[in-house]
Amino acid sequence: MNPFFFIDQIPMGMILIFISFTLLNSILPSYGYDPMDPQGNITIKWDLLQSNSGTNDLKVSIYNYQLYRHIEPPGWKLGWFWTGEEVIWSMFGAQATQQGNCSRFRGGQLPHSCEKAPEIVDLLPGTPYNLQTSNCCKGGVLTSMTQDPSKYGASFQMNVGGTTDPGKFTMPINFTLGIPGYSCPNSTQIPPSKFTSDGGRRWTQALGTWEVTCIYSQSLASSSPKCCVSLSAFYDNTIVPCPQCSCGCQGLPGSECVKFGETSSLLQQIQDPTEAPPPLVRCTRHLCPIQVHWHVKQSYKEYWRIKITVTNLNIIKNYSDWNLVVSHPNLQSVIQVFSFNYKSLDQYASFNDTGMFWGIHFYNDMLLQQGDQGNVQSEILLHKDPGLFTFREGWAFPRRIYFNGDDCVMPPPDQYPRLPNVGTIDKSSHSVIVLSFLLLLVMF
């Protein structure tokens, strides 16, 4: 069989678009700006609580200040690089994945970690109380600010020794979150944090506080998109599919997929619970793990209804606490959302065209892997705003859709479903009318 058979079946234009997108992502900077969430970031704060002779007590806090991007299992893996001979003697609320070489310490209890570049992970729920701290033990999961503001943060405490200068603590460098797409600079010293334990009657403060702000970039997270959008409407029999090769092209290197009816050998392998499973999708024309379908369902006198369906085509991965961000001018007039949670994301005072949808807890907040149950759907009822609403020129379709914070590939606007043009009569119909008129003239 010709090894390039699948490539031969793909239009050259689609291959060039996919290659161009990949090359563009390779030269984009590692930082990113998101107009939907311009202030979004993950902040890591270090508080020096106490400094003794040769050791320092520190509290490290991680806050997800993003409106819709969340950290799902297996969770964050905080890393850094010590500039001196520091070691972690003890830790509560988290743990280092490796103890490292502690052979220079003889007798007594060995340090928790002697790694020059430790990797720290959150403890799991159900950890014994003597190992916990406040706001810990969530398995590294951080919700977004919109979905659950009570679970957007995590913290742990540690005792660090072995500093070069016993009277001075030096912050480490080269911070990482262990999550694709995030880049972190070195720390910046800020005013010391203040703490209270009696409702504000007395305040104490840290000896020193440093902050690291990590930013997400989709181009850094993946060389190709992760989702695509298809469209349909009640007034047009055409279903506009996801653009071909949206997330990859069959036959190209790195675009493996599993045909319907087949089972991949990866399903038989034991997956490491501490690592995200590799992407493995069903073979489609777009090769995206997630497909979002927007259907204009009905039109009433003063309202109109749409249906959104999110389908998981990844045969290995479930998406927990998924969310969908949609940009559409009529979202300022949402009347009711069925089966999903919804909140408006009005980041700009003069615009209210962006909203966030996510699943209902214990009902559809888990998007299961590809199969009969691998989809979630909802209907939205909106008011027809006078002077704004129209079905013409594709106005009823979204301007942009994000799934879990990643921009989805939209079909070209010239392919959107359109209203039938009743003013246009084809040539055959025109000829019949003319002949009928001439026949009437002859008869009379």
Image (spheres, rainbow, N blue to C red):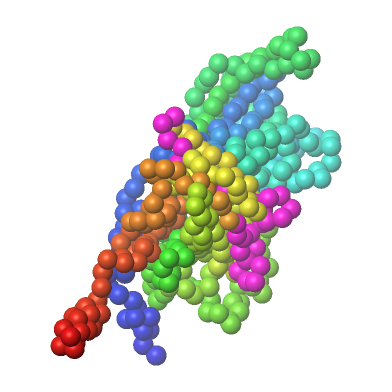
Query: Is 47 left or right of 25, judged from the image as shown?
Result: right
Of residue 341 and residue 10, the one placed in the foreground of this image is: 341
Query: Is 333 left or right of 141, judged from the image as shown?
Result: left
Query: In the rendered image of this protein, does residue 334 appear above or below residue 426?
Result: above
Q: Position of residue 16 (x, y in %)?
A: 28, 66
Q: Is 352 contained in the magenta span?
A: yes
* Quadrant in which the C terminus appears: bottom left
Q: Position of residue 242 (x, y in %)?
A: 42, 66
Segment tinted magenta in the rendering: 349-378
- Residue reaching furthest to the bottom: 1
Residue 375 can be seen, yes or no? yes
Of residue 15 and residue 415, the one placed in the foreground of this image is: 415
- Residue at the spot x=74%, y=41% of the render? 137
Query: In the rendered image of this protein, does residue 181 appear above or below residue 153?
Result: below
Q: Quadrant of residue 194?
A: top right
* Quadrant in which the N terminus appears: bottom left
Number of numbered callouts drawn: 0
- Residue at the spot x=65%, y=63% of the render? 368
Of residue 330 and residue 222, the one placed in the foreground of this image is: 330
Q: Is 400 contained in the magenta span?
A: no
- Residue reaching furthest to the top: 201
Look at the magenta stretch and give its main secondary structure. Answer: loop
Q: Position of residue 376 (x, y in %)?
A: 62, 60
- Residue at the spot x=63%, y=71% of the render? 371
- Residue at the spot x=54%, y=44% of the render? 334
Q: Position of residue 184 (x, y in %)?
A: 48, 37
Residue 219 can be seen, yes or no? no
